[in-house]
Image (spheres, rainbow, N blue to C red):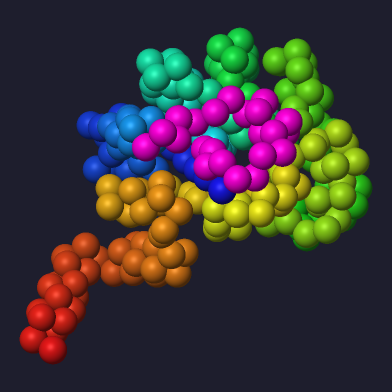
Amino acid sequence: MILFLTYHRVCADAKFAQDREFYAVSRSTLAQHLRDLIAAGMSPLDLSTLSTSADQTSRRCYLSFDDGTQDHCESVLPLLQEFNLRAVFFVPTAKLDQPGRLTRSQLRELADAGQTIGCHSHEHKRMDTMSAGEIRRQFDTSQKILRQETGAAPWIFAPPGGFINSAVCAAALDSGLRVIRTMRWGFNRQPDLTALETVPLNRHTTDRQFQKILAGRQSRFLYLGKQAAKALVPARAYERLRALAFRAARTN
Ligand SMILES: [Zn+2]
């Protein structure tokens, strides 16, 4: 099993309540997840071990942070350093130096700290509907900028929004990328390095769900179904529905 966890923005605790982004988690939640992973003997590994290890029997964990937001340098990097951990940061290069995004110097800081920088296209647009020429342009431009800024060619790719088809996959491999992390939900029980599954965390993920994810026991449908319900139904109505369901289960 390869547990590939995907995070997006990591908010300062004081700002988390106001943040509306579904995929945002608070800094203290991320810190707790890291402690839980280490306690469970699944300390996240350096990404370089991903492409070399053929061992499919052990339980391994990798961390990814998507979309190149500023907090990845300001909050996530210090936390990773505190725990002496490595992750991959998937950075859409057209967004560099935009408000709220990593600056070029922050990108270099992440790379210099030994973190892996992954290709996430140039513009972060859906790629499976692009022409062959446009797909190539997205890869060429983003890889050129990442090489310029970090001094290293990226070798791992995550398609923006998780949208991928055989043309995007072939173009990625053609451009020199070797590993692809999709947004397909799963635990990589039979890992395919060109189509790795992931478990994305979001603001509604509970401690209990995280423990189940760690154990590889979380059901995708239960997890996503409950999260969707929480995102769609106002919080108080959701709690009322839950209380009703709980009472019904007790009386039956
Ligand atoms: Zn993205």
Q: Quadrant of residue 129?
A: bottom right
Q: Nearer the viewer, residue 33 or 76?
A: 33
Q: Characterize the magenta stretch by its predominant secondary structure.
A: loop
Q: Nearer the viewer, residue 44 or 239?
A: 44
Q: Nearer the viewer, residue 135 or 32?
A: 32
| Residue 56 in view, yes or no | yes
Q: Is residue 154 left or right of residue 190?
A: right
Question: Which residue is at 21% across, 62% downward?
Answer: 235
Q: Quadrant of residue 153?
A: top right
**Residue 236: percent from left, percent from top:** 16, 65
**Residue 204: percent from left, percent from top:** 32, 53
The C terminus lies in which quarter of the figure? bottom left
Question: Which residue is at 44% across, 21% downward?
Answer: 80
Question: Which residue is at 53% across, 23% downward?
Answer: 86
Q: Is residue 112 magenta?
A: no
Label total for image: 0
**Residue 218: percent from left, percent from top:** 41, 59
| Residue 117 in view, yes or no | no
Q: In the displayed structure, would residue 143 be above or below residue 3?
A: above
Q: Is residue 56 magenta?
A: yes
Given the current orientation, which residue lies at the most extreme bottom position? Answer: 252
Given the current orientation, which residue lies at the most extreme front position? Answer: 57
Q: Is residue 43 left or right of residue 181?
A: left
**Residue 89: percent from left, percent from top:** 58, 30
Q: In the displayed structure, would residue 58 be above or below residue 218?
A: above
Residue numbers of the magenta segment: 40-61
